[in-house]
Image: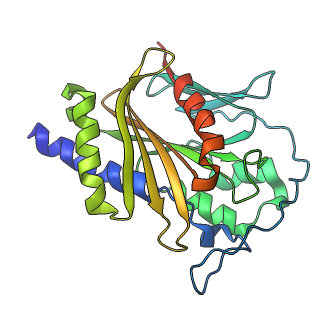
Amino acid sequence: MKKFALLGVLSILALSVASCSLNFRDMGIPFIATSTNTPRPPAKHTPTPTLPPKTGVAGDRLQTEIQEDNTTLLTDAELGYQAVFSAEWFILIADSPIEEQLAAAFGEQIADETRTFVSKQSQQPGFRVIALDYTHKYSNRPMAYFTLNYLPNPATADSEMLDVLDKTIEVIPTRTPEADVIYQNVEINAHGLEYGKMILNQTDSDTGIQLKKIVALFKVSDGLLTFTGVAWQEDYEKLENVFQKAINSIQAFE
């Protein structure tokens, strides 16, 4: 019974990881071809207008606090972990209306299409957090982002992380044939937490754009906490260490 329960949650996980794609049509990026699915050369990036200072958000389960160096401390009281994210990331949490958080940070400066994109990501199974590179520090293309999702399942608590990782990778091709896992390993982060790590190449199904993702699976409470970082393949090298820094910041607390 536990085996089937584990496979069930990993099937949902594989679908969630695969669907965390930069849906450029939803984001309304002007230099993406919508008729032929062939990307045009990126338009020249216009610096982001001055935005209001970031503010923390407090919910029943999740809260964010802006630190003196403008990094964001995320606390998940329900699942018992914390993480610190660099200043360029704007963090939205599941415990507060997404539209209100976007309006507080961007006002009228954010496109309706981007609101739609973020809203769709927030409807993924087990959504906890989405983080946007809202300063465009790493690319003049559509902003990179990462998500945290949690899928509860007691069967994962009794499973070795290597087994969880292997079974997740087995399921991915059945859910998203266009995804190719190019790296997998069980590693330990800077706070001594074991996690399963994957790096995937994936072709966006709408535009044909080549994406690259990093995924980290943590056993938290009675389930899996999943970090998924997404970027254009051309930008991934600049973002890999940034994503890894976020993964390394995750720590348990009492």
Give the side of residue 43 with respect to residue 143, left or right.
Answer: right
Is residue 16 in view from this perspective? Answer: no
Give the side of residue 1 with respect to residue 117, left or right.
Answer: left
Give the side of residue 76 with respect to residue 109, left or right.
Answer: left
Check the picture and name the quadrant holding the N terminus. top left
Q: Residue furthest right?
A: 50
196 or 10, nearer to the observer: 196
> Looking at the image, which residue is at 76% across and 49% down?
136
217 or 54, nearer to the observer: 217
Q: Position of residue 247 (x, y in %)?
A: 52, 30
Quadrant in the picture for residue 41? bottom right
Q: Position of residue 59 (x, y in %)?
A: 60, 35
232 or 52, nearer to the observer: 232
Rendered image coloring scheme: rainbow
Give the vertical position of 81 relative to 93 (above or below). above
> Looking at the image, which residue is at 90% across and 53% down?
49
Give the vertical position of 252 relative to 161 (above or below). above
181 or 1, nearer to the observer: 181
Q: Position of residue 135 (x, y in %)?
A: 79, 46
Is residue 27 in view from this perspective? Answer: yes
Quadrant in the picture for residue 215? top left
> Looking at the image, which residue is at 57% across and 60% down?
22
The total number of labels drawn is: 0
> Looking at the image, which residue is at 20% across and 41% down?
6
Q: Residue furthest bottom?
A: 35
Quadrant in the picture for residue 168? top left
Q: Position of residue 248 (x, y in %)?
A: 53, 24
